Amino acid sequence: MVIKTSDQADNRRSFITLSEKTKTILDDAEPALLAIKGVLERDAFNIDSCLLSSFSQYEKKILSVSLKKETLLAMKNNTKTFDICTWDERYAADFKRLNMNWLEQCFPHEIQGKDRALLSHPQSEILAKGGYIWFALSITRKADSDAAGVNVVGTCALIPQSSLKEENSYEIIKLAVDPRHKKQGVGMRLMLACIEQARAKNASRITLETNRALKPALALYQRLGFTEKKPTQGYSVARADVYMELLLPQDVY
């Protein structure tokens, strides 16, 4: 399974590498591993609780079902996994499509020129202004084929918060998930990508605006630690009636 070789520069050290036989086995096992990953992630992202008790809930969930059975079922139907990638011009149309779909469904009479500008010109309106855009990709692999299909099923953006620029604050905007992929952890992973990037930029806070009627989104933000606040400078769009903030701890030296 493994091959042990000596370090020619230092006889005290050895290298362990996988044999060609093992690599072949791993290639054959990849569909099963992807199915296991998909089942575990699905259940993990659907736990709605605080951190400590969520571990207990997750353990009970996994122990209450047959992982083998769920994995075989996932492989039979098609193995789906989700990858998060940064801006890719190939998916520019999907950024607009996903956001316009939910806006037209929920707020058809409140789509503003600012919305259309951001969605039609994300490179100049978001990326060029120090922002970031992510896509959630659904990768489907059929059990009887090595080919993989890729579909964009979610997107979001993070931009510097101009009104709080002196505090190095960022705002999450344009979070949208394909309705066919709701409750699969897509929104959670996109939000985590935003939070991780804001932390990397040493941001002091992250803000967002939403509407109280969007209950699943509101619940997601609360799970991630966002708290509702009163906006100091009003809302950026008329359809927003909830303003939330997440304070990020700063490094102490």
Image: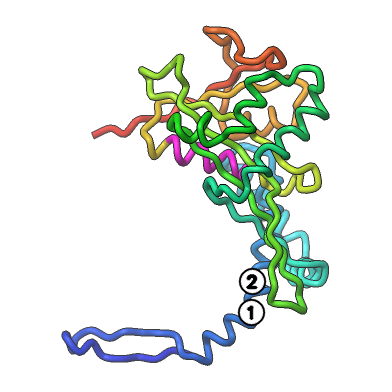
The main secondary structure of the magenta stretch is helix
User: Circle 1 — which element?
Assistant: helix
Residue 245: x, y in percent?
53, 22
Residue sitting nearer the eye, 76 or 93: 93
Give, as a single range, the part of the protein colored magenta: 187-198
Residue at the spot 23% in from the left edge and 87% down from the top edge: 7
- On screen, residue 104 versus residue 129, left or right, reads right
- On screen, residue 108 versus residue 21, left or right, reads right
Residue at the spot 51% in from the left edge and 32% down from the top edge: 124
State if disc 1 and disc 2 touch (CB < 8 Å): yes
Q: Which residue is mark 1?
A: 29
Q: In the rendered view, would you say 4 is above or below 228?
A: below
Q: In the rendered view, would you say 91 is above or below 128?
A: below
Q: In the rendered view, would you say 10 is above or below 171?
A: below
Residue 220: x, y in percent?
66, 34
Residue at the spot 76% in from the left edge and 17% down from the top edge: 110
Q: Which residue is mark 2?
A: 33
Marker disc for residue 206: none
Residue sitting nearer the eye, 146 or 167: 146
Q: In the rendered view, would you say 190 is above or below 71?
A: above
- On screen, residue 146 versus residue 201, left or right, reads right
Kind of residue at disc 2 = Leu
Quadrant into which the C terminus falls: top left
Residue sitting nearer the eye, 230 or 190: 190
Residue at the spot 67% in from the left edge and 22% down from the top edge: 210
* Crowdedness near tag 2: few (<14), some (14–19) or many (≥20) residues, C-alpha within 10 Å: some
